[in-house]
Image (cartoon, grey):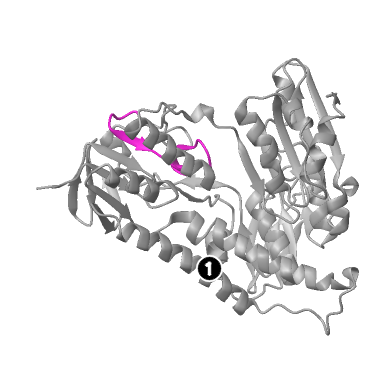
Amino acid sequence: MSRKFDAIIVGTGQAGPALAERLTQAGMKTAIIERKLIGGTCVNVGCIPTKTLVASARAAHMARRAAEFGVNVAGPVSVDMRRVKERKDEITGASNQGVTQWLGGMEGLTIIHGHARLESGTTVRVNGELLEAPKIFLDVGARAFVPDMPGLETVNYLTNSGMMGIDNLPDHLIIIGGSYIGLEFAQMYRRFGSRVTVVEMKDRLISREDPDVSKAVLNILAQEGVKFRLNSECITVENRDGSVAVGVSCGEDPKEILGSRLLLAVGRRPNTDDLGLDAAGVEMDDRGYITVDDQLRTSAPGIWAIGEVNGRGAFTHTSYNDFEIVAANLLDDDPRRVSDRILCYGLFIDPPLGRIGMTEAEARATGRPVLVGKRMMARVGRAREFSETQGFMKVLVAADTGSILGAAILGWNGDEVIHCLLDVMYAGRPYTVIQRAVHIHPTVAELIPTVLGDLHPLD
């Protein structure tokens, strides 16, 4: 015998709880299944805890810079890592509790803790019990990818999740992976007081970005004392009397780096290994992500994949938008699509990077004539007032239509200012709309019209 529902949601990440609310409000008897922590990656080991740590690291950094602003701080600045972790746990715990209470208060929702596996297109087994529903939503997320690296089994390495349990300061943190997650931890722990070395196989950091962004990010972190080893090859790991020896070269000296802790930040892997997708006829791509159509339906009728597991966005904001798309199509007769979404994300180092739309390389690949405007943050009054002059603002515009193709704002409040441009893109309006707008002075955003008033052809 099976227990019957109108809908089953597997996973409680950003999309799952919001969808549960809409389904139960629509009168559907719904089950939501979670095998670990309510709230998923963002709440427990992702956005919320890491940005809380970033805030503590910034506080330490600004305390050390106090004299620049004419502020006297008695004695050397020190960091209490136990208190840093306690603060992170308090904020994360409150978020977890908030989602848990939200779900617990939904009438018509059954919360089940356990590992779920599909047994057909309409059935899920969890804790030995068979659940049945005509609609199943997979929100199982992803986890840190652990590569097949020689010697890795000999050391106690960490991933982004394991870093959440650290309450002491590593003497020398080695980070393998020079992309978004790795760079946030690199700056954070350098500001806490660790020596930090980032090991990257490619010739530059965050290689999906434009070269000028990669170079500027490296310079920002290098100025704070983060060390880098780019073009690393023959990467190996060895336990050296309790320390971690990371081989970074077959020929160039030094061939290895010795550290006290190792963090792997080399990508993500979808949680589809033991989900029973074959039994339900749900197809995956060659990376293990569930394939979906423009409305997030899988290859199996009655099954949707939402959140990071579908490979259509690795962010909390895209996961929540997945919920909005599914709910709009299923409940509101509103045909929303994933392809309507404009790429946007941030790199939350300090100063942050806000990114939308195309890179320069992608814009060139369209074959269209492209205009670019750029302004260094050192020429932005608001940034100078706060002594935050690193980075730049850059906007790409289609020369024939005036539409904004993409932008990168690396600098003070860049993660917030970027939305000025993003909203114009969603409105389908030309750049002249914002170029002619009057912004408040003194702000960073007021310089966007200035940037757009000085466009020139992209080389």
- Label count reads 1
Q: Residue furthest bottom?
A: 75
Residue under the point 71% across and 45% down: 417
Q: How far from the left and from the top, in percent, is residue 416?
A: 68, 48
Crowding at label 1, few (<14), some or many (≥20) Cα neighbours within 10 Å?
some
Residue 334 relative to residue 220: left or right: left
- Residue that mark 1 sits on: 91
Residue under the point 90% across and 73% down: 70
| Range of residues picked out in magenta | 299-314
Evaluate whether residue 208 shows in this view.
no
Residue 15 relative to residue 65: left or right: left
In this rendering, the answer to whether 113 lies above or below 141 is below
In this rendering, the answer to whether 252 lies above or below 360 is below
In this rendering, the answer to whether 297 lies above or below 71 is above
Q: How far from the left and from the top, in percent, is residue 407?
A: 73, 35
Please identify the quadrant where the C terminus is shown.
top right
Quarter where residue 76 is shown: bottom right
Question: 445 or 266: nearer the eye?
Answer: 445
In this rendering, the answer to whether 166 lies above or below 149 is below
Question: 30 or 35: nearer the eye?
Answer: 30
Secondary structure beneath disc 1? helix
Kind of residue at disc 1: Ile
Evaluate whether residue 328 shows in this view.
yes
Residue 106 relative to residue 233: left or right: left
Specify whether residue 304 is painted magenta.
yes
Residue under the point 82% across and 57% down: 222
Q: How far from the left and from the top, in percent, is residue 371?
A: 81, 24
Magenta stretch secondary structure, dominant: loop
Specify whether residue 52 is painted magenta.
no
Q: How far from the left and from the top, in percent, is residue 385?
A: 87, 57
Question: 101 or 291: nearer the eye?
Answer: 101
